[in-house]
């Protein structure tokens, strides 16, 4: 079985790498400036010896309503690329973490006006009852750390709503998971 989970191309994984490249730039429907690869939602591509394609994706949180749109966009790309019988699987374990976001995703979020997650997700086995608290979230508009959380829940469940006290602009902050 040939796999491409990191996007590198080698002789055995060339077909899987090509399929990965075909679907990697599918945009997130809720934040279209980032791709599923930028976010770490695209977990892997497997092409078996018979040429059957399987794409694994992991939601940013279980119950994410964007997953069906992402799956449909991936399937459309695969069909357009000649992979009519490809399988797209939603894989819940291991659970997605903001640590999987690329530095590019973080830059794109900030440029789009969404403060990227700060810090790291709790380590495996850590106390999951603890709620991560940020002392400060920098405003993506003016860069000020003088901000305040208005609501733990923002425009989507993976974001919280903040306001900058310096420039007075509201903004979303991508939560750390």
Image: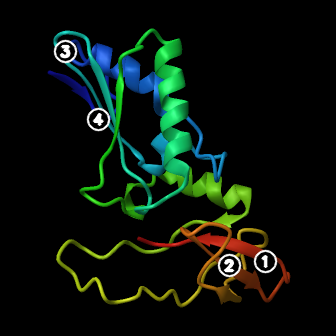
- Disc 4 versus disc 3: distance between alpha carbons? 13 Å
Residue named by callout 4: 5
Res. 170 mark = 1
Q: Secondary structure at mark 4?
A: loop
Image location of residue 112, percent across then percent down: 72, 56
Up-down: is 129 above or below 89?
below
Give SS at disc 2: strand
Q: Nearer the viewer, residue 86 or 158?
A: 86
Residues 17 and 143: in front is 17
Q: Which mark is first along the chain, 3 or 1?
A: 3
Q: Quadrant of residue 161?
A: bottom right
Mark 2 and mark 1: Cα distance apart in space: 7 Å
Q: Are marks 1 and 3 in contact (CB under 8 Å)?
A: no
Label 4 or label 2, whichever comes before in sequence order: 4
| Residue labelled with disc 2 | 161
* Quadrant assignment for the C terminus: bottom left
- Residue under label 3: 12
**Mark 4 residue crowding within 10 angstroms, few (<14) / some (14–19) / many (20+):** some
Compute the Cα span from label 1 to label 3. 49 Å
Coloring basis for residues: rainbow
Q: Are marks 2 and 1 in contact (CB under 8 Å)?
A: yes
SS for tag 3? loop
Q: In this rendering, would 36 be left or right of 19?
A: right
Mark 4 or 3 closer to N-term?
4
Task: Classify 48 as above or below 68.
Answer: above
């Amino acid at each position: 079985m040939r796999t491409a989970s990191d996007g590198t191309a080698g002789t055995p994984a060339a077909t899987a790498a090509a399929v990965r490249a075909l679907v990697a730039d599918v945009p997130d429907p809720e934040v279209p400036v980032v791709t599923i690869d930028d976010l770490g939602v695209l977990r892997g591509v497997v092409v078996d010896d018979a040429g059957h394609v399987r794409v694994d994706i992991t939601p940013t949180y279980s119950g994410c309503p964007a997953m069906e749109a992402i799956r449909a966009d991936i399937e459309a790309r695969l069909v357009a690329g000649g992979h009519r019988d490809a399988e797209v699987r939603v894989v819940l374990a291991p659970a997605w973490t903001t640590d999987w976001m690329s530095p590019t995703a973080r830059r794109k979020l900030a440029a789009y006006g969404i403060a990227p997650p700060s810090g790291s997700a709790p380590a495996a086995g850590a106390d999951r009852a603890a709620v991560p608290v940020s002392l400060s979230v920098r405003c993506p508009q003016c860069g000020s750390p003088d901000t305040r959380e208005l609501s733990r829940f923002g425009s989507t469940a993976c974001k919280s709503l903040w306001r900058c006290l310096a420039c007075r602009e509201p903004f979303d902050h991508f939560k750390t998971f």
